[in-house]
Image (cartoon, rainbow, N blue to C red):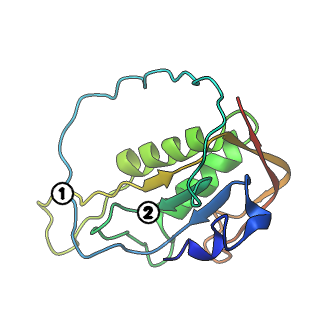
Amino acid sequence: DLLDPFNDVNCPTLRGKPRLVFVQACQGKRTDGGHKVPAPASAPSQSDSAAVDINLRISDDFLVFFPSFPGFVAWRHTEQGTPFVQSLCSIINQHFHSHDLLTMLTLVCKEVAYKFGYHDPDDKAQEPKKQIPFFNSSLKKFVHLNCEDVYDDCDDYTNRQTFLNCEVQSREK
């Protein structure tokens, strides 16, 4: 398993620290034609449960973010790159100062789902194929990025790099 080298047993120095894995790769060959839906409603609020001492799994405090659901393709424009990375860069650059990581990743999912679609150039009548990122999380705290300097080259397609000078901080709220 990709995550095993970083679990609490194999890497005890990371115990209690968030392990963030961002994967840019297809997870299959299926395509998603999408479907029409009304405008999204706001998400329900969350409440924290009381703290108790318990035994935890050795693979807690992981977050893995994929560009698509298991079994589905991840689209890539030959010049502009991937909608997943474009949105991830853009959302982090816009919201790192005011949102926790899971909120930003949810915004990435929304942007990719609503803003991007692949059109087959040979089929003009076809609805665009869609993509939505997917993440798994076993984080127990909110993760915030403390970025001092952000260099956004996401719009410069000849130099597809984004440099974030960030410290990852995890907190109860």
Horizontal relation, residue 73 to residue 50: left or right: left
> Disc 1 marks which amino acid?
Gly
Please report the residue visible at 22 percent of the width from the left and 60 percent of the height from the top: 32
- Pointer 2: residues within 10 angstroms few (<14), some, or many (20+)? many
Q: Earlier in the sequence, mark 2 or mark 1?
A: 1
Please name the residue shown 62% across and 53% down the image: 61
Label 2 sits on a secondary structure element that is: loop
Q: Is residue 156 above or below residue 140?
A: below
Q: Position of residue 76 (x, y in %)?
A: 42, 72
Residue type of the residue flagged with mark 2: Pro
Secondary structure of the residue carrying tag 1 is: loop
| Residue 59 location, quadrant | bottom right
Look at the image and tell me in which quarter the C terminus lies. Answer: top right
Q: Position of residue 125 (x, y in %)?
A: 11, 60
Left or right, 94 with respect to 47, comes to right
Q: Real-space Cα distance between discs 2 and 1?
A: 16 Å
The label number, if any, that marks residue 100 in the structure image: none
Please name whichever residue, 33 or 169, is drawn nearer the observer in this view of the structure.
Answer: 169
Q: Which residue is mark 2?
A: 67
- Of circles 2 and 1, the one toward us is 2
Q: Image check: 17 left or right of 84?
A: right
To which quarter of the image does residue 62 belong? Answer: bottom right
Look at mark 1 in the image and give the residue it sits on.
33
